[in-house]
Image (cartoon, rainbow, N blue to C red):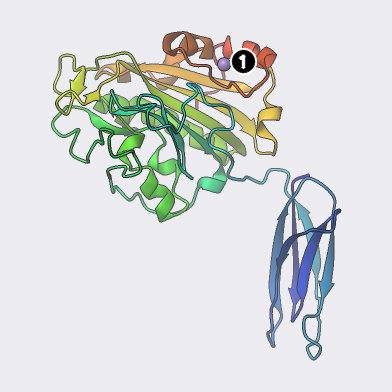
Amino acid sequence: MKIKVFSLILLSLCITFFSSSKDKIAYDCSSISSSLTKATSNVSISKLVRFQIRKTTSSDRLNIDDIDFHEYLNFSTRDDNMAMGNPSNATTTASNINNYLMAKPQFSLSYNNSKGIPNWVSWHLSSAWKGSALRSNCFAVDKSLPSSFYQAVTTSYSHSGFDRGHMCPSEDRDFSIADNTATFLMTNMIPQSPKLNRVTWVALEKYCRTLISAGDELYIISGGNGSGGSGSNGGTTTTMASGKISVPATCWKIIVVLPNGINDVSRVSTTTRIIAVNMPNTQTVNTLPWYNYRVSVDHLEALLGYDFLSNVPLNIQAAIESTVDIGPTN
Ligand code: MN
Ligand code: MN
């Protein structure tokens, strides 16, 4: 059990939930009104709770018309963007210029100063991150990079033949304007060929959001590998912005799929669905659908030298990292 929602009609009262250790865990629903109003209190706790309803003033009448308890086993939350691990052991030491950890509320990443792009970006996705904020399109320099680091500007990709390809997608962070704005920081971008960014990569991003609509939560990690892509200018491009930004040969992504719940790492089992892909950064990538590019996590670990899902017990990693996903694709 994860969540209880409690609703009732009230006039003037206060409802307080206590955990079994008598700590207040939620309080809500104070109202003074001459008409009946509806109050709801959400409690997210995985142990027993008890509750209290009482008047908050001596003169008002307490009038409870109806009371309901609902239990939502499938309630979504926002969880740690790096819960599954830190694939490259990135650190926040400024001298660690090519594996520099940046943890933001919306996503975490390892920045590579020599490449001018992230090594990887890691984020949690559930319906709790979703809302109705509009796509902000406000690409911006990431001013939280150490000042000695190369900082891509919004025009760094202009005329390169490559798009500013979001790792954590704009549409995965539209709960608020602040969340959406964060995804437009240049540290969340990798040069992607237009056919990759706008066709094949985005198709997998959309598939991920169908999973959260169906009651799953995801842990996603993505980045680039190798050197040299082929964008809309043709040929092979290895760098742009006067050599400051590297163009990867492929873009990879790993997705851990769990039903909504708590204690996520401990719920990863040998049967947990893992979708891993590695897509060429070219203008012909779209000749095949996204699911044709599925690979094993072990394949990506060998290519990149990272340990993905390192917070998962080794015996479970061994099982889920060696297989290629054959699950549904739409
Ligand atoms: Mn994109
Ligand atoms: Mn691993």
Q: Is residue 12 above or below residue 175?
A: below
Q: Is residue 311 above or below residue 7?
A: above
In terms of image quarters, where does ligand 1 lie?
top left
Assign a secondary structure to mark 1. Answer: helix
| Residue 7 or residue 51, whichever sits in front | 51
| Residue 131 or residue 120, whichever sits in front | 120
Q: Image quadrant of residue 171?
A: top left
* In this picture, residue 91 sits left or right of residue 134: right
Check disc 1 and report the residue beneath it. Answer: 320
Q: Image quadrant of residue 156?
A: top left
| Residue 10 or residue 166, whichever sits in front | 166
Q: Residue at x 18, y 23 (%)?
A: 243
* In this picture, residue 316 sits left or right of residue 131: right
Amino acid type assigned to the residue bearing label 1 in the image? Ile
* In this picture, residue 289 sits left or right of residue 208: left
Q: Is residue 130 above or below residue 327?
A: below
